[in-house]
Amino acid sequence: MAQTSIWQQILDPSHRADPFPLYAELRKTPVVREEDGSYVVSTYREIVALLHDPRLSSEMRNLPELGADTPAQASEEGPAELPPNVIQADPPEHDRIRRQLTWNFGPPHRPGRVDSMIPDLLEIVTSEIDGFTGKEQLGTTRVDIVDDFAYPFPVTVICRLLGVPREDEALFQAMSDAVIKAIDPSTGGIAEQQRRRAKATADLGQYFAELLDARHGQPGDDLLSGLLSGDGPEAPMSYEQILSNAALLLVAGHETTVNLITNGMLTLLRHPEVLDRLRRGAEPDLATRVVEELLRYEPPVQFLSNRYALDDIEVAGTTIPKGSPVNLVLAAGSRDPGGVPNPDRFDPDREHNEHLGFGGGIHYCFGAPLARPETQIALTELARRLKNPRLVADPPPYRPNPTLRGPRHLLVDIDGVNPAQHRPP
């Protein structure tokens, strides 16, 4: 019987609660070839180099198993496949799409969009925590940080940003779950993953097509309306590309933030001294430092799959042959002792905190300017307002997906809720 590789063990859901010892083993060999011909890269410097290497492609068409001539076509299962979104494209197409998205999202063209959302973020968080008061049982309140807070908060935010009706939450949650399941590298081969991903994304695109049709002649101030109007310096994004990238932003805009907030609260409850510092509010920049350390210590995105070598690439003495699939294990790289001292210690007071929590290179996380303040506000208000929070189970149950790692539930008992200190205007 063949021995299970470290990478296969990492993909096994039984290791989801604590994959970090496996990551430490993986780093002993910076580049590992798996039986299926894929390569796994786990050390900080090597991952950073590959994130900036144009020979590593994100375009599925470069996978020999699919081929560059594979057309997007309709099937009996659903609508036609959509074109690649911004994280599935290489330059120059990637650069063009990203400029169009950035023009409507934030700096330098819309510098006030995220800043103007801060009062809304605080208002939503305040409302969600106020809702905890209806859950008292025998003097104790039990809340699920995931279902009662970490999921509804970023969902509401991304709905407002994109202009998605809030009442459609249940609908797009199901579609989003299908996309997340499709990108799980532990389920099926690469070509099968791509087929599932294309089908799930096409279903989301069909949903957004109905929203866009309603906006013709009646644009709003939301991101979808901006993309539809095409008021940037380049030619407007095609209708199909708007659908593809809207589907990406909806999924990526809340799934990763849910995990970041939940991982953050779990980590703070395991480190009550940091939670107490955040509660007291005597350090104005502490929330910023806490979130940056969380992105390194307990990142919501564990690794990047579906990357392909366009040429032979030598990495740490190993040659990755042209056409090979490559997995970049960001979470292992962020805990590499060669990149940061004492990497397994949660320490928001680090002087130098280099992490891969938002990836890097041309595909650096598009939503980072929003995810940071979302998480800072969420964790600060939870710390200030929850009375005597304590974990019900440690470790909590985790989602099975190894890529987007986070608890499925995070049950916390509290003795009540403090009044909001800063009511939104």
Image (spheres, rainbow, N blue to C red):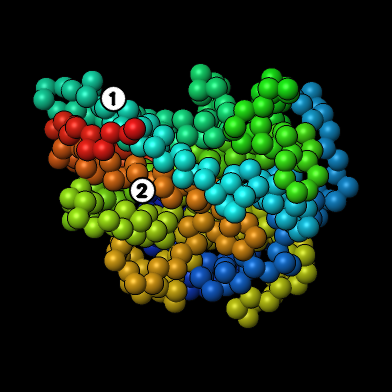
- Please give the label number shown on residue 304: none
Task: Estimate the x, y position of residue 117 in percent, counting from the top left.
Answer: 46, 39
Q: Is residue 308 left or right of residue 129?
A: right
Residue lying furthest right in this view?
69
Task: Estimate the x, y position of residue 167 in percent, counting from the top left.
Answer: 51, 18
Instruction: Label 1, secondary structure: give it.
Output: helix
Depth order, front residue of 35/246: 246
Could you tell me how far apart the alpha carbons at marks 1 and 2 are, in whole angstroms? 20 Å
Dot 1, how many residues are within 10 Å of its Cα: few (below 14), some (14-19), or many (20+)? some
Q: Is residue 343 above or below residue 161?
A: below
Q: Is residue 49 above or below residue 197?
A: below
Q: Is residue 367 above or below residue 157?
A: below
The residue at 46%/30% (across/down) is 156
Q: Amino acid at mark 1?
A: Gly
Depth order, front residue of 99/243: 99
Residue 147 falls in image quadrant: top left
Q: Confirm whether residue 349 shows in the render.
A: yes
Q: Amino acid at mark 2?
A: Gln
- Please give the label number shown on residue 376: 2
Depth order, front residue of 220/3: 220
Task: Estimate the x, y position of residue 233 in percent, counting from the top left.
Answer: 75, 49
**Mark 1 = which residue?**
131
Q: Earlier in the sequence, mark 1 or mark 2?
A: 1
Residue lying furthest bottom in this view?
317
Q: Is residue 263 left or right of residue 30?
A: left
